[in-house]
Image: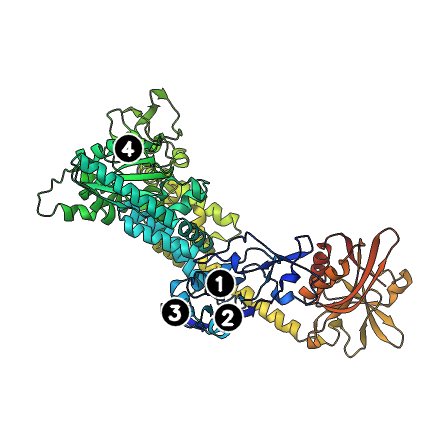
Amino acid sequence: MSNWKEYTLEELCDFQNGFAFKNSDYVDSSENTNEVFRMGYINRGGGFKEDTTPVFVPQNYPKNLDKFILKLNDITIAMTDMKNSMALLGYCARISHNNRFVLNQRVGRIRVVKNDILDPIYLYYYLNSSKQIDYLRANANSGVQVNLSTDTIKKSILKVPNIEKQREIASETLEIYAPLAHRLGISSVKWELEDTSLRYLHPAQYFSIVGMMKQKRSAREESIKEACESITSLLGEHNIKAQVNGRPKHIYSIYKKMVKQNKTFDQIYDLLAVRVLVDSVADCYATLGLVNNLWVPIPGRIKDYIAMPKPNMYQSLHTTVIAPDGQTLEVQIRTYEMHEIAEKGIAAHWAYKEGKKVNKDNNFYEKLNWFQKIAENDETEATAESFMESLKVDLLSDKIYVFTPNSDIIELPKGSCIVDFAYAIHSEVGNKMIGATVNDKIEAFDYKLSTGEICDIRTSKNSTGPKRSWLDIARSSQTKSKIKAFFKKAAREENLIKGEILLKDEIKANNFDIDEVLTQENIEIALNRYKFATLEELYVSIGYGGISANKVFARLTEKIRKEKQTQEKLEKLVNAEEEKKIVTETGVYVKGVDNILVRLSKCCQPIPGDDIVGFITKGRGVTVHRSNCPNLSEEDKARLLDVEWVQSLNARRYSVTLQLHAFDRELLLQNILLTLSESRVEIKKLHSEAKSDKTSVTTIGIYVKNVSECDFMIKKLRQIPDVYSVERIVK
């Protein structure tokens, strides 16, 4: 955190207090009203919620309310509360609507103005942190009604890291470290990593779930208490010693079910959960029977991870039942040893067995082979990118479990096909495979397997080996590595020739000279990057598909392309310097002529970006017109000169005239003026005329920098409701 910087809130943000509306100001909702943002829109614990009793004020309110209109990503803060409750004071909500709300008194608005330093989403999370809330409440004015002063909020200290790096770390945590913790069975670490990462990546969803959980906490805690007492009493009657307690549901798992399974908060069954710890496996199954007899079990929600443990050695019985109060309740049943391994990971197995002789042929060691297999990936794939890909696909992705005819279980990444299954058994099984059946039915090699299926691989000594097309259908990186290893060994000479041709064709296709690219220096760079001893080995790898010719080409030409880019930049700088030398008052240069009077035509009003010509005016120098100006006749062509746009003195702005045709409605002119004002355009003149056919013609004179800015304004004006057309006109 050494690179985290401290700022006061007022250094990075603009703060605005709300407007003191009166009850007499409120009107019924209509198209021409703004919703008043009051304290009721802020959740306890932070976050936005819809007010059940919204109030509205007219958009044409007698006082100008522009500075009180809330914009997207504005943050609102509760500035008052009752001392005996302190439920809302200091908590914030983030605005996800533009121009919907107008800010009420005792609610503050925080708007980030230094966007290059502070991200609004990060700020929202930071302001709702317990540390910040404690600071604000400690510095609030005391009394029956507690208030936050503007100065207290502005002087809040913000610790700001590099936001992009922060998001990168959070994303990495979710993709790698949290799944790895899960794979190792360290559930407590996994939950903490996932929940913390969710705060950074999706703070709005995080705090929304927190809010929903808090709303139902008291009822949930009471239900869990009653369930624990019922189970304890029941087991005591049957002489089963047990430890029964409630199990909290972590936030990321709720988020994952809501988003990925498209479930609502109320559809998640295991929000209420109880964990039962007993002495033996027999007690586990006895407890399961008693619980399912006590309450109604939900079909399909009974899971036996004792008979079939997870790859991380997790063991437990799960059942979801309907309690007497109508709530769904998940009950987990396991032994104390199972619980220790579930909480602290596979390393806890050693701790639990300390002092006992452990058989090295034990199934435990087999369960650890998954990591060794990743670490011992084929040397042809020994790059950081390939290792991370192997980790994500083979180790951290969702799994399926497929049976051999001998009832052995083969674990595979979800989406695996028959080819993956064959190579997971043994490399030679895959290399000699000629066919396969799934559940006694012949299937193609690209058939995607599912958990519980029985797959039987047919092999032949006369098989010529795998097909290159298998690389396209295989899911597991280990499978692909084994197939590539076969081709590498079986067809080295063929791959050598093929790889050289592929690389040289790639060089030619990108318009590079082969001799210029394949220098000793460039070859050494590529060999070091991809860990090859010789150029021949590199060709072989390209030939069998271990590495793409495109990637090698990019590495070989890295230095050449950097030199070319540097040269191009220098040329641009030189050209730019040459262009800067020419500066005129009008921003127009008459080619080949210096010290001549130049003025811009008032009829077509040329601006930078327009195609222009110079017209020699007797006694008045050169008048600049747009090339398509209708006021230039054929006989004028003899008096035309070549001119060009250059840099102007004092960052000059240019006058243009726009004509707007629209339906003649109320507030049309106000909408036009508001659009121009929001775009910070200087208005020269504005004239509007109503027609007998319920239309209006509005002529607008504005100042712009260039054609791009003019086109932007035309586009913005066309977006106003009931506007038919906006055109730039010639006088």
Amino acid type at image mark 1: Asp
Q: Which circle, 2 or 3, is nearer the viewer?
A: 2
Q: Which residue is mark 1?
A: 119
- Residue 384 visible in image: no
Residue 17 to residue 504: above or below: below
Q: CA distance from mark 2 to mark 3?
A: 17 Å
Q: Which residue is mark 4?
A: 294
Q: CA distance from mark 1 to mark 2?
A: 10 Å
Horizontal placement of 476 versus 149: left or right?
left
Name the N-terminal-most of marks 2 and 3.
3
Name the secondary structure under disc 2: helix
Q: Residue at x 8, y 47 (%)?
A: 355
Q: Residue at x 27, y 43 (%)?
A: 228
Q: Which residue is mark 3?
A: 3
- Judging depth in this view, the residue of 491 and 45 nearest the camera is 45
Residue 151, percent from left and from top: 49, 75
Residue 654, percent from left and from top: 75, 69
